[in-house]
Amino acid sequence: MVLMKARVHVSFKPTVLDPQGQTIQSALRSLGHKSIEHVRQGKYFDLEIDNAAGREQVQRELEQIARDVLANPVMEDYQVEFLD
């Protein structure tokens, strides 16, 4: 079995407030990092997938998983990245 590695990045859409990002920005500025103007936080998921189905089918499946399970498409954007 050949495994393919992928990462799904999930973050708030630009129009959604990010209170955790604002808190991080404030903390950085209070620590002397005055050049930091804006912080947006996010999360990522690393997945290992059986590559027997082929890359295109895996891409479609990961897009569906990201849209239906990993991200809230009303508030979040996602990006699928293959690591190998």
Image (cartoon, rainbow, N blue to C red):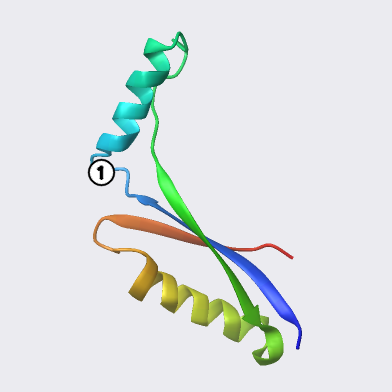
Where does label 1 land, which residue? 15
> Residue 37's spot in the image, x, y percent?
40, 20
Q: Amino acid at mark 1?
A: Thr
Q: Is residue 19 above or below residue 62?
A: above
The image shows residue 71 at horizontal and vertical percentages of: 35, 64
Tell which of 55 and 49 is nearer to you: 49
Left or right for 44, reference 83: left
If the image is split into quadrants, where does the C terminus sit? Answer: bottom right
Q: Quadrant of residue 69?
A: bottom left
Q: Rate crowding at label 1 as few (under 14), some (14 to 19) or many (20 or more) other CA atoms within 10 Å.
A: few
Residue at x 41%, y 47% (from the top left corner)? 42
Whether residue 7 sits left or right of residue 42 in the image: it is right
Question: What residue do we see at 50% from left, 82% from top?
Answer: 61
Circle 1: element type: loop
Name the residue at the bottom extreme: 53
Q: Position of residue 64 (x, y in %)?
A: 42, 78
Residue at left offset 66%, top offset 69%: 5
In the rendered image, which quarter is residue 31 located in? Answer: top left
Q: Left of 58 or right of it: where is 79?
A: left
Is 20 left or right of 84, judged from the image as shown? left
Residue 9 drawn above or below residue 54? above
Count all numbered tags in the image, as a single digit: 1
Rendered residue at 37%/24% (across/down): 25
Give the position of the N terminus as an image quadrant.
bottom right
